Amino acid sequence: MRSISSSPEKEVRVRLDGVTAEIRPRSDWESVDLGLAMIRRDFWRSLALWWLGMMPYLLIGGWLTSGLPLLFLFGFWWMKPAGSRMVLHQISRRLFGEIPRWSTLLREIPRATWRRFFHRFFITRLSPWLPVTLAVCSLEGLRGKPYKKRVSEISRRGHGAMMAIYLLADFAAFWLGMAVFLIAAMFIPEGQEGPWTDAVASWDPEEIWNIPPLITWSFTASMMIAISLVDLFVTGAGFGIYVNNRTWLEGWDVELAFRRMTQRLTKALGLLILLLVGFFSSPLEGQEVENNPPEAADVVKEVKEHPDFKIHKVKQKVPETSGNSMPTGLLSVMQVFSSIIGWASLALVIAFVAWLIWRFRHVLVFRGEVQSLSKPAARVVMGMDITPESLPDDIPGTAWKWWTEGRHQEAMSLLYRGAISRAVNVASVEIEPSDTEGDCLRRVKEAGATAQPAYFQGLTNTWIALAYGGRQPQSDEVRSLCQSWPFQERRPA
Amino acid sequence: MAEALPRLDTLQTVELADGVEIRLRIAGPILRIAAYVVDLAIRIAALILIGVALSLAGVAIGENVAEGLVLLSYFLMDWFYPVVFELGKRGATPGKRLLGLRVVQSNGSPITLGQSILRNFIRFIDGMPLFFYAFGLSSCLATKRFQRLGDLAADTVVVYDRLAPMPVLPAPPPMAAAPLTMALTPDETRSLVWFRDRAGLWSEARRAEIADQAAHLTGATGQAGVTRLMAIAHWVQEKRKNH
């Protein structure tokens, strides 16, 4: 717990420990987005609270303006800060990790309207900063001079965003109101449009201002829904700006980082003593990145110079149309002129389409199943050439000859390489160039009996033991591997 | 308990291959609406120009042909304007570019032709009812990554492309440098640097309050703690390279 205050009388306590949104210094629009996300998190609760906050107006204003829907709508729009105040109460507490109980929230309802009534609904009602100053007023509870000082501090950042929101909000509400109206109209059940068509029919074009009550009331209701939705998010956006500005102004993120650091350090106290000794003069991680950029820039330049990165341009020359007869009058000049424009626009369209095709030609190249079916067999596996041409005709015979000559490694290598080659080229096992011994064995096993998995298993074991373990196989073992070679060989006669 | 819950954030962390993490700065609906309005103005202007040119040309190529071409260009402009621009190098229509936005896949890579077509053809549904965009706006506000229906279908997001410079106001340079006596994580080191770079924005009392939180590191509180922390930050920024 700590306090931030501008006036000694009133203190606002902010508990940063349980904060439920990432506190970091943001750009203005990002902080607006965070505010929108806060509303999204508590959407239904906030919406309900907004309407609860408007209850006093709905009751009193509804009674005062009975029979005058448009006046009622205007009053509703004017009084909307009462709803905002309730929403702010909810999302600000939620930000600091507290979910306010309904009983406390209900007690806030009259306050949302009556507390600082004159200030909120007359002095600051039309200010673009209202969503932000509402937080200063309601959360920090400041008045008079400290309030003004605080507002001028808080409103140092985010002018552009607040102004844009201020100018957009009511237009957006109107726009959304029309959408709500239309959506509602879409949901009128078939056969029930009677009252509606009657109302439209009774709307006399001579007396355009004498709108039938059904139309006015449905318009008013749509607008009220839209105003509530827009104001909900505007309140969130204002609160987002408020939180961001305080983060900048008071270094919330730095404080949080220090706090977490202290927690970590005290937790790791035992380990710390060891680290103290070891790390005293050694460089720490991070911060070294700055050394790289010049090097990286060179690499980027080099890569960009490659012909693949050259920008291709298609230029299409438009052949000039040579008229058969010389234009004589102004009319024929016009004709030639306009026909040039006509052909030029046609050519432009063609050039554009050609450019599109050229630009996205990679999309048109057919890729997919067909290609993978006819994929050629691998030629090199694990860095070993496995094409039949690279192997002797009689693999086991040659291998055994080499073994008896003492070229053990080469003999086993030939045997293994040969087995893979035969598996690929005779038994059509699909082996990728990047496969390891284990992958090869698995693929051979999956391929079935023609690929001789049992023989392959034994050979692989012996090969791995030699290649990686350095264990020489017994001569008997090698001989049996050579003799039991399962593939057909063209032995020299 | 609150620590266990993921904290609300506008940045989305995406883990790429090899454990590399990038953060996407997801953009919200308000700037996107502004970008849409700019694009709409550009499209209308272009259509007017094409219309004038073709009606002049109509004398030569025939009125019906000209009318057909106008309709064709209207159709192309309506459906393919965003598709083509978003496939470009900047991944943005002119309006988005103006406002510093860009369309990317949800893993941060540039979008493909299919995604561009999908996200922009579903605009038709996002625009409902009629052209009021209520569906798209609702979807945008309801999803974590501010995605409209087209974005959801194509798995794309709109992100901020330009970083606004962060306003910093460093405190006066400290007299001494003090080496770090404890191993810090990169995040903690960064917060030290932030402290020094932004201290000029804070009041003296506030600086002391923040520095008190790091008393474990500095071994001092109040003004002495601030001075000590500045010295450490100075060492971290300037002197460590020489060690």
Image (cartoon, grey):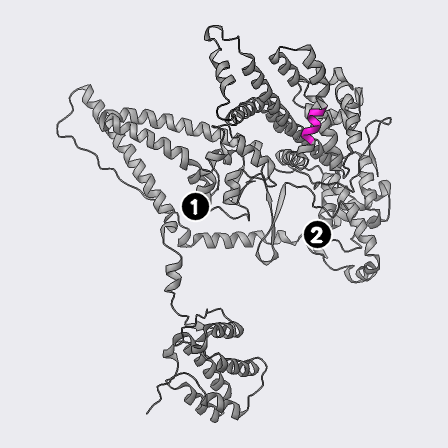
Label 2 sits on what residue type? Answer: Pro
* Relative height, residue A282 to residue A328 (above, below): below
In this rendering, does residue A157 appear at all?
Answer: no
Q: Is residue B135 above or below residue A260?
A: above
In the depicted view, which residue is nearer to us: A154 or A426?
A426
Q: Is residue A348 visible?
A: yes
Q: Which residue is mark 1?
A: B113
Q: Which residues are magenta?
A: A46-52
Residues indicated by labels 2 and 1 sit on the same polypeptide chain? yes
Could you classify mark 2 by the number of other residues whose Cα lies within 10 Å: few (under 14), some (14-19), or many (20 or more)?
few
Q: In the figure, A68 relative to A271: above or below?
A: above
Residue farthest to the front, as pictured: A191
- The answer to whether A142 appears left or right of B55 in the picture is right
Chain to which mark 1 belongs: B
Image point (39%, 33%), residue name: B77
Of marks 2 and 1, the one in the foreground: 1
The x and y percentages for residue A64 are 69, 10
Quarter of the image with the C terminus of chain A in it:
bottom left
> Tag 2's secondary structure?
helix
The quadrant in which residue B199 appears is top right
- Secondary structure under badge 1? helix
Amino acid type, residue under disc 1 in the picture: Leu
Can you give x and y, in whole percent of width and height, for residue A46 in the image? 69, 31
Q: Chain of mark 2?
A: B
- Looking at the rendering, in which quadrant would you find the N terminus of chain A? top right
- Which residue lies under the disc numbered 2? B186
Q: Residues within 10 Å of mark 1 (few under 14, many from 20)?
A: some
